Image (spheres, rainbow, N blue to C red):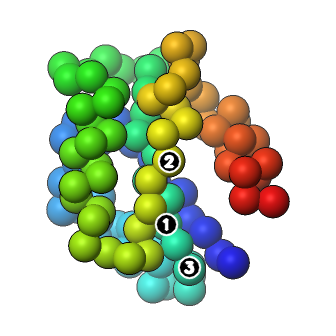
Amino acid sequence: MKIGIMGGTFNPIHNAHLLIAEMAREEYGLDRVIFITDGNPPHKSANVTAKQRFEMTHIAIADNSAFDEDDFEINRSEKSYTVNTLGYLKRKIS
């Protein structure tokens, strides 16, 4: 299975995020694209909670059966770094 990862603060998620994910899915023949909402990013702050941003993402991707999301980062209290998330996803998917 070929999986793409779309990460971001999604504050808010918008049509460009969805378009980029769909274009990548088509271009690279991905079976799924997993959206990862940053929980506590080290480079910026958000004006809404991680849970609210995750819920907005859930609503935004609901119409595309190839899109999924994972709450790994929003459930972490420490800063979120890509290397940790990729390690988690590798263990989860393997």
Q: Residue 40: percent from the left, percent from the top?
A: 44, 20
**Which is nearer the eye, 59 or 80?**
59
**Which is nearer the eye, 57 or 79?**
57
The amino acid at mark 2 is: Asp
Nearer the observer: mark 3 or 2; the answer is 2
Q: In whole angstroms, how far apart are the C-alphas of marks 3 and 2? A: 17 Å
Q: For mark 3, does the 10 Å Cα neighbourhood hold few (<14), some (14 to 19), or many (20 or more) residues?
A: some
Q: In whole angstroms, how far apart are the C-alphas of marks 1 and 2? A: 10 Å
- Residue that carries the numbered disc 3 in the rendered image: 30
Taking the spot 33% from the left edge, 27% from the top edge, the residue there is 50
Asked if disc 3 and disc 1 are in contact, CB closer than 8 Å, the reply is: yes
Taking the spot 19% from the left edge, 41% from the top edge, the residue there is 12
Rendered position, 31 above or below 79: below
Rendered position, 10 above or below 80: below
- Residue that carries the numbered disc 1 in the rendered image: 33
**Which is nearer the eye, 31 or 14?**
31
**Which is nearer the eye, 75 or 81?**
75
Kindly indicate the quadrant of the structure image that contains residue 88: top right
- Residue that carries the numbered disc 2 in the rendered image: 70
User: Callout 1: helix, strand or loop?
Assistant: strand
